[in-house]
Structure formats: structure tokens, C-alpha cells
Image (spheres, rainbow, N blue to C red):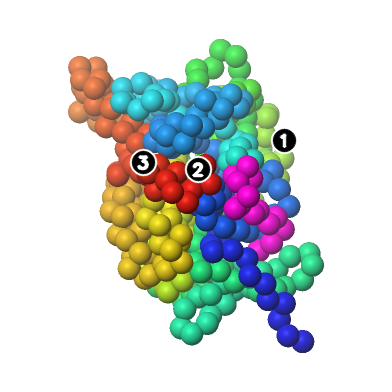
Amino acid sequence: MAADVSRASKCIVAGGGPAGIMAGYLLARGGIDVTVLEKHADFLRDFRGDTIHPSTMDALAELGLLEDFLRLPHQEVRYAEGDIEGERLRIADFRRLSTRSKFIAFIPQWDFLNFMAERAQAFPQFTLLMQTEAIDLVHDGGRVAGVKVSSPSGERELRADLVIAADGRHSRLREAAGLKVEDLGAPMDVLWFKLPRGPEDPGAVLGRIKAGQALVMLDRGDYWQCALIIRKGTADAVKAQGLEAFRTRVAEFIGPSATQGVASLDDVKLLTVRVDRLETWHKPGLLFIGDAAHAMSPVGGVGINLAIQDAIAAANILILPLRAGAVTEDDLSKVERRRTFPTWATQWFQTAVQNRVIDPVLRSSRPPRLPWLLRFLQRYLPIVQWIPAWLIGVGFRPEHVDLDAIDGPGGARQ
């Protein structure tokens, strides 16, 4: 039987996560016929990246979307703190940034995705196909000419001038493209669970360190989203010890009462940490962005925002060639060159923290101590809190929307 082949649009975006939805919105607003493929029936899932950082909110402001976005239920976290064996220090103070929003917005990722998808659907150039997964690439004359998709109605081919692969760290299209991946490694994995939050608890990101493990607590309003950091490959052993042993482990950080919020080990989810990046992000007719191009460590929680910055850069650079119907490999290479340094620099920072801070803590059986230099700087030079706030909240080479290109002649807002 012949394959079911149909023309999709000028651009197909595989993956309806933050990078894919943002790319789809920007391209459609720029007048480009774009189809975004999302393999699930909706966005209502348990994501690990539920933070929108100041640099992303700056971009939303440039698009005229920030005011509506901030009407969504969210928490505003203005500083991050650490607790080393009971000694508290403020790690990052986002109030010192020069951005419009001087906080990190904690918001369920499905709310952000629904928000962006609803705004994109205001443009007739935008199509969102749910329950439609890109499972392979379609080639024509030495270039990628579309994707093979799977949906409840079966398999078919969708053709387009350009495929943007934003299908995450387990990207099927990355495997299909056969591109080389550089694995940077990670010494830890994360066990993800929720604990009740009392009204008197501080509203912040809290990091707590004990001998052999660490706990990060994210303020989600009426509960804490918790990440227990453990040595890589030990999750099964931790769970095999049973529920009470797990509660005891967590109680070392927060006391025994709150741990009753973990009713079952089924409530504890494993996040396998990977840090890698493609050596080359593109082939003729194909571009990778977001986690599909570079899987980020959870250190700093910056992965979602780096993915969105990739989407902005891709739209800024590719809208004019897409309008002209002539996207070249040089155009795709410009996107990669634009985003290589911030990716490399962010991963360098993350792996430095992993290898020099987290790994020694996880390997140690002795209580950690706060270095005297950090204690001194915390007391006498609090402006140093700006540096990690900038690294987390803004990052290397934040992208700004090129409104002249997106809303210029040919744009959907004309």
C-alpha cells in the first residue's frame, strides 16, 4: 500500500514542549504556515521544568504577552537559599537583576503550554496536531523533506520545507538523523516527590545538603516540589529499602512530620539526569533545538528557558528565508552558531557544579561545612548574590524577539 502523504506547511515542528510551542507561535505570528506535532492528547502531565525565568518573561513582554501570562496562577520566587548542616545562606537574589520581572515564576508547565498554544491559534497559519508523534524523517534528494507521523488514524507522511526537531532529550528524530552526540555525564539522579507546605514556610527555592545527599525544595504554593539528589544508578536501591526508610532519609532534612506526605513510593518518580549536546544541530531541511539539541542538567533549572531562547533565535533567523521559500544549510548553521556559546557555557557551569560540589557531597560520609569564604561574602558582600541570580535568571546571551522580522511585511499581525 502506498504511503499516505500530505503537504503540512512550510515548517513542521516536532514536539509541543516549550521550544516547540514557542517556535510555532513565533513562526505563525511571522506569517509562516507551521504545524506543531504533539504526541500526547493534552499538555496535562507531570513535568520537571515548571519555572519561567526573568529572561523568558522579558521575551513575553516584547511580544505583548507578559501581562496576560502573569494573570495565570503562579508563585513568584525572589531568592534562592541553601542550608548546609543547619547553616543558612542566600545563594541568589533575583531582586538585583535589571530585568522587567525580578523573580522566577513557578507555574505548571501545562499552563504555560496551553497559554502559548491558545495565542498561537489566533493565527490561521498555526496548526497544532495532538496525538501525533514524529517517528521518522522523510528524505527527498539528499535533504529532509518532512516526517513520518503516527496518530490514532495510523501512519502517514507530512512534507514541509523545514523540520524543526524539538522532541526532547529522548528525541526519536535525533536518532533517525544519525547525528553525533557528546555525552558530558552526570554523577547524580533525582527522586521527585511532593510534600505539604505550611503557611509559615518561606517562599523560596531551598537547597539543603547533608552527608551523602542533598534536597532541593521548590515553592509550589500549597506544597513543596522536592528533588532528592542521589548518586547515579542508586534509585532502585533507595526504593528497595522501603517507604519508611525513604521517609527517614527525607526526615534528616526537614524533620519527620512532613514526610507523611509521601504516602507511597509510587509517589516518588525517578528523573534520570543526562547532560549532552549534538556536535552538529542540523542537516539540509532539518534543525534541532531545545533538549533535542542539548539535554541540560537540572542544576539551576534553566533547561526550559534555554529551550525557549533557542526557539526565539531560530525564529529571528529563519522567518525571512522561510517567507522566501529558500532555507539553506547556512541559515540553519546561523542558528546553531548563535546558540552554541550559551549552550556550552551553561553546560560548563552545570557540570562544574555537578563535579565540584554535588559529586563530593554525594561521595562523602562526613557532614559538609560551609567554606569560610562563602560565610564571609554572605555577611559582608551580599552583592555576590547577583552572580548566581544572573546565571540562573538571565543566562548567557539571552535572546530578544526581532519584532521587525516577525511583525514586519508578511507577518500575520500586519
Is residue 36 toward the left or the right of residue 327 in the image?
right
Residue shown at 65%/63% (left/top)?
Answer: 133
Percent position of residue 53, x then y: 44, 34
The tag on residue 400 is 3
Instruction: Please identify the residue farthest to the bottom as the structure is shown.
Output: 1
Sequence-earlier tag: 3 or 2: 3
Can residue 12 be seen in this snapshot? Answer: yes
Q: Is residue 127 in the magenta section?
A: yes
**CA–CA distance in space, label 2 to label 1:** 54 Å
365 to 100, vertically: above or below: below
The answer to whether marks 2 and 1 mark residues whose Cβ atoms lie closer than 8 Å is no
Q: Secondary structure at mark 2?
A: loop
* Residue where numbered disc 1 is placed: 263
Examine the image and state in which quarter residue 320 appears.
bottom left
**CA–CA distance in space, label 3 to label 2:** 20 Å
Sequence-earlier tag: 3 or 1: 1
Q: Secondary structure at mark 3?
A: loop
> What is the span of residues highlighted in magenta in the rendered image?
120-133
The tag on residue 414 is 2
The answer to whether marks 3 and 2 mark residues whose Cβ atoms lie closer than 8 Å is no
Tell which of 414 and 188 is nearer to you: 414
